[in-house]
């Protein structure tokens, strides 16, 4: 269990004891991940999720917040939105007493839900912060709620109802289907969509300006494309590239390399051997690809894009290939060998 004051940001701040000891030596600037440095500070800072932000702002006006359920793909602003909302409600001080954040790294079995959440939920709230609405309830954020056991989710139903006069829950997850129906139906649901290219590009360009990153426009476009609507991924990749290249210009190829994108000529080669039906040829190409160490999931995603856009394949061929790609992707997700699965894909008829 941890309260908001012990956030990731605090973790990266230099400790007080460290500060006094090293006062005589010049200190390196604290290493701060850009995903935290550029985490939206308030609701207006959230890119691309206009509908969600508009509805939440309306709800804020009435100060009567329902239980919330945020769902959507990674890196689209779910955690950032609830943190920004809480900050707007309580201000930077009161937030420490009024908001409890639990995520998948905390123990969240049935006992925790019964004991800790109940304890936090049942203590009454008092006082308010100057200039902030400070509504008379607490917020419990259950991040990554889809990794909670079914029993723990069931235990939450009662707690939610019992303390609803002084507590609001915000469940956050990637897969809404993993939240049990009785729990989902108690919440107002908000879907977070993958970020559109324009908003991601704007944000990346802003970071490049602030941090003096030498990232030419075509590299920014490429970065936005490979991160597929995941803002966290795009910022992480930008920071990795910056660490490596500092003030040198970052090329498109360098960005692909950092992102683990498989080079197009290799995808061409895989498509050609898939069509060749020559087992020896397939085997040697697969060995080469596996040796190069590309991720299986990345290969499947790029091959899938290529199959869909290939003008020489008929619809029937495309659908057969896509079906095999789906089966292989599922097997890889279940932990199957990348080598065997790639062989299985390329020997499959279509
Ligand atoms: N809509 C957005 N607007 C601005 N920045 C964003 C947005 N979405 C993500 N980011 C950036 O990405 C980082 C991660 O976002 P956040 O933690 O909110 O994602 P998430 O949706 O909770 O992802 P996950 O499902 O993996 O927990 C933020 O610190 C921020 O820098
Ligand atoms: Mg999150």
Image (cartoon, rainbow, N blue to C red):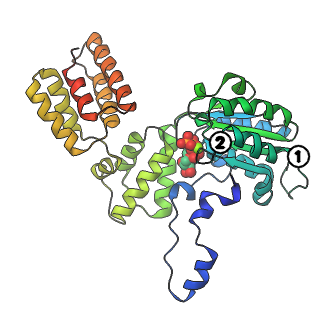
Q: Secondary structure at mark 1?
A: loop
**Residue 64's image quarter?**
top right
Residue at 31% x, 36% y is 296
- Observer-nearest of 268 and 100: 100
**Residue 333's image quarter?**
top left
**Residue 142's image quarter?**
top right
Residue identified by numbered label 2: 108
Residue at 63% x, 37% y is 145
N-terminal of the pair, mark 1 or mark 2, is 2
Reply above or below: 2 against 229: below
Mark 1 and mark 2 residues within 8 Å of each other at the beta carbon: no
Q: Is residue 280 left or right of residue 32?
A: left
List x then y, in percent, for residue 192: 59, 34
Q: Residue furthest top?
A: 316
Residue at 60% x, 40% y is 144
Residue identified by numbered label 1: 136
Q: Residue furthest bottom?
A: 24
Reply above or below: 190 against 19: above
- Observer-nearest of 40 and 328: 328
Q: Is residue 166 left or right of residue 33?
A: right
List x then y, in percent, for residue 316: 28, 10
Q: Is residue 7 left or right of residue 329?
A: right
| Quadrant occupied by the C terminus | top left
Reply above or below: 18 against 256: below
Residue 148 is tagged as none
- Observer-nearest of 122 and 94: 122
């Amino acid at each position: 269990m941890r309260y908001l004051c012990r956030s990731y940001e605090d973790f990266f701040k230099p400790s007080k004891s460290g500060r006094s000891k090293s006062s005589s030596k010049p200190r390196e600037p604290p290493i701060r991940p850009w995903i935290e440095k550029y985490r939206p500070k308030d609701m207006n800072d959230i890119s691309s999720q206009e509908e969600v932000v508009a509805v939440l702002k309306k709800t804020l006006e009435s100060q009567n917040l329902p239980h919330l359920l945020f769902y959507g793909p990674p890196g689209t602003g779910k955690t950032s939105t609830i943190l920004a909302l809480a900050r707007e409600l309580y201000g930077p001080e009161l937030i420490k007493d009024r908001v409890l954040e639990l995520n998948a790294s905390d123990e969240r079995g049935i006992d925790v839900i019964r004991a800790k959440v109940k304890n936090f939920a049942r203590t009454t709230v008092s006082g308010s912060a100057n200039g902030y609405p400070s509504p008379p309830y607490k917020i419990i954020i259950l991040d990554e709620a889809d990794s909670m056991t079914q029993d723990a989710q069931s235990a939450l139903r009662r707690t939610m109802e019992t303390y609803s006069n002084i507590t609001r829950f915000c469940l956050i997850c990637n897969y809404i289907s993993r939240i049990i129906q009785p729990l989902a139906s108690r919440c107002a649901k908000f879907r977070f969509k993958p970020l559109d290219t324009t908003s991601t590009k704007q944000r990346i360009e802003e970071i490049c300006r602030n941090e003096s990153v030498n990232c030419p426009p075509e590299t920014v476009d490429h970065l936005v494309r490979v991160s597929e609507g995941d803002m966290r991924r795009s910022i992480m990749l930008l920071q990795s590239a910056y660490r490596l290249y500092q003030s040198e210009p970052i090329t498109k190829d360098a960005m692909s390399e950092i992102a683990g994108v498989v080079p197009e000529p290799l995808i061409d080669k895989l498509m050609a051997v898939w069509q060749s039906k020559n087992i020896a040829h397939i085997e040697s190409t697969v060995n080469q690809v596996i040796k190069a160490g590309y991720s299986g999931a990345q290969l499947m995603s790029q091959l899938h894009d290529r199959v869909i856009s290939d003008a020489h394949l008929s619809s029937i061929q495309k659908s057969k290939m896509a079906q095999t790609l789906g089966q292989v992707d599922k097997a890889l997700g279940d932990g199957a060998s990348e080598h065997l699965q790639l062989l299985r894909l390329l020997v499959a008829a279509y």
